Image (cartoon, helix red, strand yellow):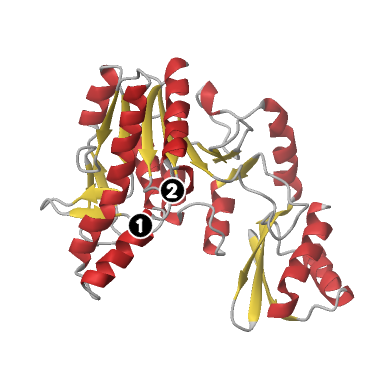
Amino acid sequence: MKIKIMKFGGTSLSDPEKIRLAAGHAAGEKKKGFSVVLVLSAPGQVTDELLELARRINPSPKARELDALLSTGESLSAALAAMALEAEGHRAVSISGAQAGILTDSAFSNASVLDINPKRIISELKKGKIAVVAGFQGITRSGDITTLGRGGSDLTAVALAAALKAEICELYSDVKGIYTANPALVSSARKLPRVSYEEVMAMAEAGTEVRQLRAVVYAKKHKIPLVLRSSFDSEPGTWVGDFKHTGKSPEVTAPPASLQKTDIQFEASGGVRCLSIRKHEKSAEITLIGSKLNNRKIKKAVLSAALTNGCRLTRAAYFPGKAVLLTDTQHGEKLLKVLHKVFIGC
């Protein structure tokens, strides 16, 4: 079987039409010859609503009961998406984390995946069905439901991709991929066609909500190729992988050959690939992500840009894969835009 994992986040499932759209994407890939595993988050604001409901019942609920409650959001999505597929004539089945064989430890609210037995999923795929799996949830050896932390459906998707030896794992959301900076802050930010696992991990550590950090670490460990793309258009997304590795890989996991030359040149010369910002009460932390960033040329360019634009640097730490800069809160966005222009060129 040629298996594809397709994960959709909550903003892509916030109403019935969006759930139908996600189901339609899965059906489309099934028609292309893939055996499809659809992994879903809870719809829209459902998790927050469940948390509020819990607080109204008990201000300090036990972690076990809270996980049992919060997991219902993803189960809701899975059942509705399976219904949507069946309504359009496609064979589908909703599967909980427990039914999917996702075994976790008992760290409620932030459980780790210990093992996966995908027997049930494989059985359903062999019957020609689309397996619609509730993300974010697993089960302990003692039979308790657990959740996998904020963004845990990413981890569900990546872990299943590893267990099923999937060709690819696509992560859908309301953004088109990873950009050189937050487009809401830097209008000239460009979408990156491909990034490394290390770069995405650095973004997550810097506070950028690109993907769950544990999911990316898991993907890197098991060499799972990821694609981050939009639920709402067909534009190519951003590939995430170990692009310095030149070993043989399935054809479906390879990004277009036209992208390879650019990134090989980047790896050879070094430079800034993207920037992120995290605001604190009295300061703003800007992180430059790339390679060979602890060299004199990079340091000189940063200092010159800050001084020329009246932005005071209170701290600057340089490492091979990232540079962390601290400035006053009021200068944060200005410095971000200036550095983006200096290093990205727009």
Relative height, residue 167 to residue 213 (above, below): above
**Label 2: element kind:** helix
Residues tagged 2 and 1 counted as in contact (Cβ below 8 A): yes
- What's under tag 1, amino acid-wise? Thr
Earlier in the chain: of badge 2 and badge 1, it is 2
Res. 167 visible in picture: no
Number of on-image labels: 2
Instruction: State the residue lying farthest toward the right.
Output: 308
Q: In this view, does 210 lie to the left or right of 158?
A: right
Res. 108 visible in picture: yes
Q: Give the residue drawn at x 50%, y 36%.
A: 225
Q: In which quarter of the image is residue 235?
A: top right
Give coordinates of residue 163: x percent, y percent: 32, 35
- What's under tag 2, amino acid-wise? Gly
Q: Nearer the viewer, residue 285 or 320?
A: 285
Q: Give the residue drawn at x 36%, y 29%.
A: 84
Q: In this view, does 224 lie to the left or right of 139?
A: right
Q: Residues within 10 Å of mark 2 (few under 14, many from 20)?
A: many
**Residue underneath mark 1:** 47
Q: CA–CA distance between discs 2 and 1? A: 9 Å
**Label 1: element kind:** helix
Give coordinates of residue 98: x percent, y percent: 20, 43
**Residue underneath mark 2:** 10
Q: How crowded is mark 1: few (under 14 residues within 10 Å), some or many (20 or more)?
A: some
